[in-house]
Image: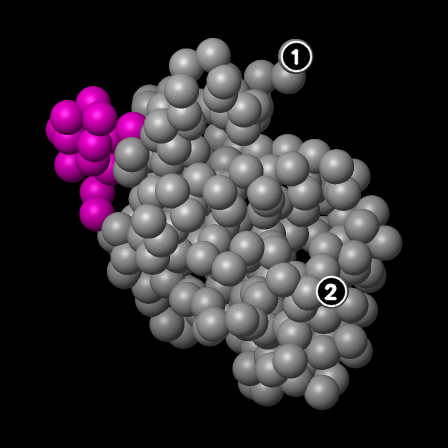
Amino acid sequence: MAAHRLRQSVGRLFAMGTELGSGRRDFSAFQAFTEVLRLPSKQLTKLVFPLQELHGHFVPGSRPDLHLNIFHPSLEDIARAESFFTASARNRIEYLTSAVRLDHAPDLHRPEGHTKKLNFYKVGKYFTLVDMPGYGYRAPEDFVDMVETYLKERKNLMRTFLLVDSVVGIQKADNIAIEMCEEFALPYVMVLTKIDKSSKGHLLKQVLQIQKFVDTKTQGCFPQLFPVSAMTYSGIHLLRCFIADITGNLKTTGFQFS
């Protein structure tokens, strides 16, 4: 997921399905998690649990609730999840196909359509990641037909991920996707990108504002935020573990509801 970067002021959606199929183009893995485990404790927390690391910058006794423990898997669980996202001869991670509308989306046996609108990526035998086009002022003219129909009618859609630029926070364009998810009663997750682009103070401010928005303005959004960086890879391992868990491929002890 981190390989897909956002354009400035253009939001993106990712959808998680369970379709399987054959593919053509491989993706390479990033830094092995075994190397991450060798990092000093402070660096490990910053890389794997960036929200927890941010929380540590508040004055004790006045720290806001950032829902740190709703999904807080062990390092062992995160290490296990990495195997799903590591390409090998037995676990191919590859481009599947593209589609312009729901009726062009591939079935399990005969992928077809190459319009490069909704891009499907098969992650081994486990699930399919759907990279949706940007929304907002640079959205394609057929965005509504393309994306709304898919989100509303795709029966095996498991979770939608809304990628928000953490530098600028939630913009008017982001509300397009939020309103769609809320209207269709779709479970979705807020992923905050580009966390390496801001000062610590600015990032803290944005995280608090977005957390407040999620808590007070949404019903279908997962309450815990997922800050990530495609440059430093911060937060990516935790997000991968979350995906492995919600798709039923990894049973962790990470979910804690109180």
Q: What residue appears at the point 36 percent right and 24 percent down from the top-left corner?
A: 56
Q: Earlier along the polypeptide chain: callout 2 or callout 1?
A: 2
Q: Residues within 10 Å of mark 2 (few under 14, many from 20)?
A: few
Q: Is residue 52 left or right of residue 35?
A: right
Viewer-proximal residue, 64 or 235? Answer: 64
Q: Position of residue 146 (x, y in %)?
A: 73, 76
Q: In terms of secondary structure, where does tag 1 sit?
A: loop
Q: What residue appears at the point 40 percent right and 20 percent down from the top-left corner?
A: 59
Q: Position of residue 83 (x, y in %)?
A: 34, 40
Q: Position of residue 223 (x, y in %)?
A: 64, 33
Q: Position of residue 134 (x, y in %)?
A: 59, 73
Q: Which residues are magenta?
A: 31-45
Residue 81 is at least partly visible in this image: no
**What colour scheme governs how the chains and residues are painted in the rendered image of this protein?**
one colour
Residue type at mark 2? Ile
Viewer-proximal residue, 237 or 26? Answer: 237
Q: What residue appears at the point 24 percent right and 37 percent down from the top-left corner?
A: 33
Figure quadrant of the N terminus = bottom left
Residue 41 located within the stretch drawn in magenta? yes
Residue 64 is at least partly visible in this image: yes
Residue 203 located within the stretch drawn in magenta? no
Which labelled disc corresponds to residue 176? 2
Q: Is residue 67 left or right of residue 74?
A: right
Secondary structure, magenta segment, majority class: helix
* Structural distance between the alpha carbons of marks 2 and 1: 31 Å
Q: Residue 28 occupies which quadrant of the picture? A: bottom left
What residue is pinned by disc 1? 258
Residue type at mark 1? Ser
Disc 2 or disc 1, which is closer to the eye? 2
Q: Residue 25 occupies which quadrant of the picture? A: bottom left
